[in-house]
Image (cartoon, grey):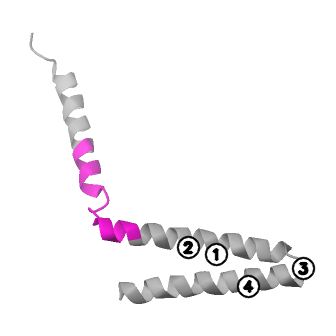
Amino acid sequence: MARGWESKSIEDQQEAAAARRASQAAPEVSSADAARQQERDALHLARARVLSDLQRACRPAHRGMLEQALADVDAKIDALKDRRS
């Protein structure tokens, strides 16, 4: 049985929308780039956690440990930036 004009038009619109979504999708990322991005995200999360802990720390020894951890995370972030260049 033949399709009606309206159902064909809707199907065409759906196909066009799917094609637009596919063309706007993020470009293919290499596995090395994805791993670097994942490592960078993990370091930024670790930095946020250390900063949060540092704001609540009371004991000088604990604060010192957290400050050292923060410096270490910052150094790793800087090393990732240098590797990218």
Which quadrant of the structure image shows residue 80? bottom left
Q: Looking at numbered disc 3 in the image, what kind of residue is underneath it?
A: Arg
Say which residue label 4 marks.
67
10 Å crowding of disc 3: few (<14), some (14-19), many (20+)? few
The residue drawn where x is 68% and y is 81% is 69
Indicate left or right for 19 with 25 as reference.
left
Q: Give the mark nearest the N terminus, 2 or 4.
A: 2
Q: Give the mark nearest the N terminus, 3 or 4.
A: 3
Establish if 25 lies above or below 38. above
Q: Give the mark nearest the N terminus, 2 or 3.
A: 2
Which quadrant of the rendered structure holds the N terminus? top left
Q: Label for residue 43?
A: 2
The Cα atoms of the two marked residues, 3 and 4, are separated by 12 Å
The Cα atoms of the two marked residues, 2 and 4, are separated by 15 Å
Q: Which residues are magenta?
A: 18-35
Q: Give the mark nearest the N terminus, 4 or 1.
A: 1
Q: Is 5 inside the magenta-drawn segment? A: no
The Cα atoms of the two marked residues, 4 and 1, are separated by 11 Å
Q: Give the mark nearest the N terminus, 3 or 1.
A: 1
The residue drawn where x is 66% and y is 72% is 48
Say which residue label 1 marks.
47
Q: Secondary structure at mark 2?
A: helix
Q: Looking at numbered disc 2 in the image, what kind of residue is underneath it?
A: Leu
Q: Which x, y percent locates residue 6?
A: 21, 24
The residue drawn where x is 26% and y is 43% is 18
Q: Main secondary structure of the magenta part?
A: helix
Say which residue label 3 marks.
59
Q: Are marks 2 and 1 in contact (CB under 8 Å)?
A: yes
Q: Which x, y percent locates residue 47?
A: 64, 75
